[in-house]
Amino acid sequence: MRFDDVVGQQHVSQTLKNALRNEQVAHAFLFCGPRGVGKTTCARILAKVLNCENVTPDFEPCNECNACQSFNENASFNIHELDAASNNSVEHIRALTEQVRFQPQQGKKKIYIIDEVHMLSQAAFNAFLKTLEEPPPYAIFILATTEKHKIIPTILSRCQIFDFKRIQIPEMVSHLEHICKEEGIEAEKDALHIIGQKADGALRDSLSIFDRIASSVPDKKITYDSVINNLNILDYDYYFKVLDAVLTEDLPQVMLLFNEITNKGFEPDIFINGLAGHLRNLLVCKDAQTIKLLEVGDKVKARYHEQSAISPMNYLLTALNIANDCDVEYRMARNKRLHVEMAIIKMTYINRAISIANNPQAVPATSEKKTPDLSASEGISNVEQGTRNNEVKAATPPPQTQNPEKEKEARSETAVLREARPDKPSITTPKLGGGSLLSKLEAEVKDEAEQTDEKPDLFTTENLEKVWAEFIEKIQSPSVKSQFKNAGVELGDNEITVKVSSEMAKGSMQTESGLMPFLREKLGKPTFKLTYDIDKSLRKEIEKPDIPLPMTPMDKYKKMAAKNDKLEDLRKRFDLTFDE
C-alpha cells in the first residue's frame, strides 16, 4: 500500500520519492530485477501517488481519497495494467496507443503498467516506440521485466531504469517476524531462516511458503521440524553428522548415513549439492571478514563455528572440489548412487591421500608389516605347523638330532634369519622335499626388505643420459630425433636443463607430450622442473636428416635433358630461359 511497505528496495523507493518531491517525474520507467522482489508493487504505488488527491508529507498515497479508493477496488479509469506475456502482439499495442490519445477524466495522469514487457514481439516494440518517444504530457508508462537484455536498445534509451535487487535473508526473516506478530503466529527464527533460504531471494515466494506452512501447523506454531517436513528439506543435522564421520575416516558410518538419507526419498544429487553448500559454509567461517556470508540462524551458526575449527583449510578446499566434480558429472553417470558414494569415499580419505602425496616414500602409520604365513607355505602340513609352534613356545632346548652336521647347518641358517628379522623368534626348520623351509622364509624376508627399504636414487646424471637415449629411440620423426640427439641435458637440484640450438628445436621438443611422463617414470621422481636453454654453439653439430631436398626447375631440366639430348636443341631454338 505504501513505499515503506516494500522490503529491501529502499534505494528505489527513496529515488521515486525524491522525484515526486522535486516534480521531476519521467514519462517512462523500467523496473527490472528478479521475480518476486517488488517491481509491480512499486509500479502500483507510484501510480497511486501520481493520482492521489491528498499526498502525505513523505509522498506516500493517502489511501483515503476517491482516486486511491477506486484503485484499491480495481475500478480506476486512469491506471491500466497490461500483461505483455499474453498480450504481446501488434494489435494489443495499437489498442493501448489508441487509449493514450484520450485525456484522463479524473485525476492528473494516465498510467500504463506493462508487466513482463520483454515478451513483446519485435513488431510490437516498434509499434510502441513512437508513442513512448513522444507521449502526451498526461501519460506515464511503467514497464516491468525480469530480463532486461531482451528489450531493444531504442526502448531502453527512452526509459529511466531502476534495478531491483534480490531480497536478503535477514530482510525476509524480519518481514516474516513482523507478519507473525501481526497475525498472532509463534515461529522459531531458524524456521523462518529456512523459509528465506527456500525463497531464493524472492519475497513473494517466501510469503507463499509461509502462508502454506502457517495453514498446515496446529496452534499457529511454526517450528523448525515442521518447516523441514513440509518443504521436504534435508536437515542440517545430517550434514554435520556426515562431516564428523568423514573427518574421523569412519567410512561405515558415512555410508549408513547416506543410505538413511536416500531411504527418506532424497535424491543423491540433492545430498551432494547440500554437502557442497555445507562445506562452503565451513569455509566461510574460517575468516572473520566472510562470516557475514553465512545466512543461517544463530544456533546453526554456532555449530558451523565449532565444526569449522576442527576442519583444515586444505581439506575443505579438496572436499569442495570433489563435490563440485561429482555434481558436474552426475548427469552422465549411469549408477547415480555409486557415483555419489565414490565422491564420499574420496572425501573420507583425503587426509591420508594428502600425507602420502607430501611424503610418497613414507610408510603409512596404519600399515603393519606382513609376516609370512607359515601355514600357507608350499609343502607344509598342519602337523608340521603345530610342531613349529610348540618349538617356539617351549623353554627347553630342542632335542638332539641324529645328524650333528645337518643340525649345525640349520643353526647357522637360523642365525642368518635372526639377523635379518630380529623381531621374529628363531625356529628349527626341517627339510622339505628338495628344498628347506628356511630358504623360502629367507626369500620372503628379502622381498619384504626390498618393499620396506627406500628405493635407490634414480635421479642421477648417469641414469638421465641412459633414459634420454632410450627416449630418442622411441621417436619416429627423423627431424625430431635429430634435434633430440644434438641436444644436451644437465641435471640440477630438482631440475633438468635441456640445451638446444634454436627456437625451432625447442618447439619441436616441446611438442613431444610423452617426454615428461617418460622421464618421471624412469627417473623415479614425480615432480621436477624441465627447462630449455638455447645454446647457439650447438648449431654446427646438428645432424641433418637424410631427407631429399626438393628439385629446382634447373635440376628437373638437367635430368630430362640427360635422357633426351634433343631437349637442349629445343631450348636453344625457342630461346627459353629459367625463372629464378
Image: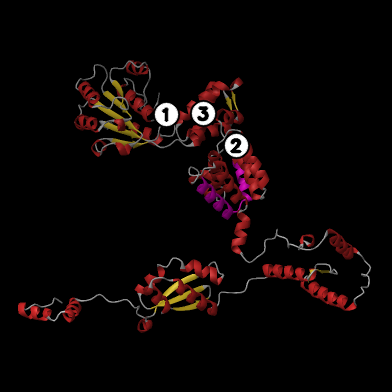
Point out the image quarter for the N terminus.
top left
In the image, residue 256 sits, relative to residue 541, either above or below, namely: above
Amino acid, disc 2: Thr
Q: In the image shown, does 502 or 25 lie closer to the viewer?
A: 502
Chain-order first, disc 2 or disc 3: 3
Residue 305 is a magenta residue: yes
Q: CA distance from mark 2 to mark 3?
A: 32 Å
* Residue at 92% from the left image edge and 73% from the top image edge: 401
Determine whether, in the image, residue 421 is placed left or right of residue 107.
Answer: right
* Residue at 29% from the left image edge and 32% from the top image edge: 29
| Residue at the disc numbered 2 | 262
Residue 48 is a magenta residue: no
How packed mark 1 is, by other alpha carbons closer than 10 Å (few <14, some 14-19, many 20 or more), is few
Amino acid, disc 1: Asp
Q: Which residues are magenta?
A: 301-326
Determine whether, in the image, residue 361 is placed left or right of residue 569.
Answer: right
- SS for dot 1: helix
Q: CA distance from mark 1 to mark 3?
A: 15 Å
Mark number, residue 176: 3
* Residue at 42% from the left image edge and 74% from the top image edge: 532
Q: Between tags 2 and 1, which lies in front?
A: 2
Q: Main secondary structure of the magenta part?
A: helix
Q: How many discs appear?
A: 3
